[in-house]
Image (tube, rainbow, N blue to C red):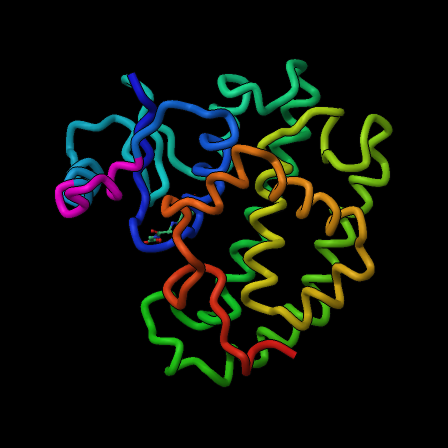
Amino acid sequence: MPYELYYWPMIQGRGEFVRLALEEAGADYVDIAREPDDEAGMETMMGFMGDKNLRHPPFAPPFLKDGDVVVAQTAAILLYLGPRLNLAPEDEAGRIWTHQIQLTIADIVAEAHDTHHPVGVGLYYEDQKAEAARRSEDFRKSRIPKYLSWFETVLERNTSSKTHLVGRAVTYADLSLFQLVDGLTYAFPKATKRALAKTPHVAALHEAVARRPRIAAYLASDRRIPFNQEGIFRHYPELDG
Ligand SMILES: N[C@@H](CCC(=O)N[C@@H](CS)C(=O)NCC(=O)O)C(=O)O
């Protein structure tokens, strides 16, 4: 049975962290809302979310279905998939450390989203531009450097490898840090370039993940949705600097 990923079909968004793990592992999976008849896929996804018989209803996409198991929340999905896809350490301490890193990535992803929607998720960007400018200035000057330097420290302190966050083999956390750096570079090219100049291990990890054969093939394929102005990482030139 293939894994079933449920996520919005037009954006990378949070679903991308799951897609990257499935792609790196060469897993058999179906991106339900992106099937050739994507309207039917969307209907299936929305129907699933509204299913009153579901004991564990997802709050929001992404969610993963593996047989009878349904898991939502990006970090929980990766916690579930990690050992199954051989993308997490075998020991419990290593797994919980990988999960902590993923949760920290989830934190900055939420902050990146809030740069363009600081007042309300349901409001247009155009209706919160002044607040977005203030929020982005703080994000650029304080939050991007703080988070990236923490990832740099994690890489420096990994005694087994300087190109992996955990141990000596690739984990889903490495793939997610790649995606975070890719997204920040798209949204805030100037600020991210400055931060990456001070975090060379993070920059090297980003390049190393992009060169992994399955990831490189995925990035070059039409399965990789281009960044756009509907996703989490949006490029508004006025918010960068
Ligand atoms: N903490 C959740 C957040 C899920 C989430 O916010 N999903 C977005 C798309 S990326 C969504 O569809 N939200 C709908 C809503 O919040 O009403 C995760 O990491 O998966």
In the picture, residue 64 is in which quadrant?
Answer: top left
Vertical position of residue 55 compared to residue 5: above or below:
above
Quadrant the C terminus occupies = bottom right
Residue 176 rendering spot, x and y as whole percentages: 57, 42
Vertical position of residue 214 compared to residue 180: above or below:
above
Quadrant the N terminus occupies = top left
Range covered by the magenta-colored residues: 31-40
Residue 37 rendering spot, x and y as whole percentages: 15, 43
Q: Which residue corresponds to the image point at 65% horizontal and 29% vertical from the top-left?
A: 170
Residue 32 within the magenta-colored segment of the rendering: yes
Q: Which residue corresponds to the image point at 22% horizontal and 39% vertical from the top-left?
A: 35
Residue 138 within the magenta-colored segment of the rendering: no
Query: Would you say 55 lies left or right of 143 here?
Result: left
Who is closer to the viewer here, 183 or 73?
183
Who is closer to the viewer here, 150 or 167?
167
Vertical position of residue 149 compared to residue 59: above or below:
below
Residue 65 rendering spot, x and y as whole percentages: 31, 26
